[in-house]
Image: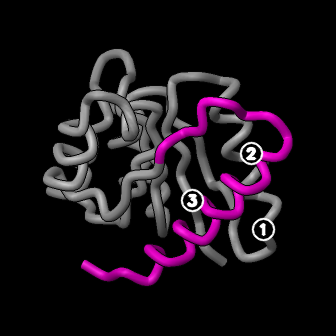
Amino acid sequence: MIRVLVVDDSPTTSELLIHILDADPEITVVGRAADGNQAIKMAQELSPDVITMDVVMPDMDGVEATRRIMSTTPVPIVVVTAHADSDEPRVAFEALKAGALEVVAKPVDMGQDNQGIWGQSLVLTVKAVAGVKF
């Protein structure tokens, strides 16, 4: 079973990610954090196999949280952000530089069709990085 910590300040997005990930029989979501500080604490407490990490959050952004998690309790991190495909390509670069293994763009339209296709891609990404050891 792949244990995932979901980190996103949006309750709606968090619930969607949890719904998508928990629907796969090989994945279980073990926690949800709403900011980078909570993510660091929960990564230490829960020892997840994978973390999905938003970038733009209050208190501490996802890039800094990724950097700190990777320096204390390294775990595969998949950044899930609306900024990956924007005019800010540095967001993806900074997340990868901080230690994230993959950057996944949140779809602009989360209609049922896009949600299913995007969700399948997210699940495959989480499964792919789950086996990475540090």
Residue matched to label 1: 24
Magenta segment: 105-134
In the rendered structure, find residue 75 and report the number of the disc placed on it: none
Q: Is residue 80 left or right of residue 65?
A: right
Residue 37 visible from this viewpoint? no
Camera-side mark, 2 or 1? 2
Camera-side mark, 3 or 2? 2
Q: Is residue 101 left or right of residue 49?
A: left
Of the two numbered discs 2 and 1 on the same chain, state the one appearing first in sequence.
Answer: 1
In the rendered structure, find residue 114 and report the number of the disc placed on it: 2
Q: Amino acid at mark 3?
A: Val
Q: Is residue 113 above or below residue 119?
A: above
Residue 65 visible from this viewpoint? yes
Residue at 65% across / 24% down in the picture? 11
Of the two numbered discs 3 and 1 on the same chain, state the one appearing first in sequence.
Answer: 3
Q: Position of residue 38 (x, y in %)?
A: 41, 33
Q: Residues within 10 Å of mark 2 (few under 14, many from 20)?
A: few
Q: Nearer the viewer, residue 52 or 116?
A: 116
Q: Position of residue 95 (x, y in %)?
A: 24, 46
Q: Position of residue 39 (x, y in %)?
A: 40, 40
Residue 6 lies within the magenta run: no
Q: Is residue 96 left or right of residue 10?
A: left
Residue at 44% across / 74% down in the picture? 129
In the rendered structure, find residue 4 and report the number of the disc placed on it: 3
Give the residue furthest to the top.
58
Whole-angstrom CA distance, mark 3 to mark 1, is 12 Å
Residue at 82% across / 60% down in the picture? 23
Q: Amino acid at mark 1?
A: Asp
Residue 117 lies within the magenta run: yes
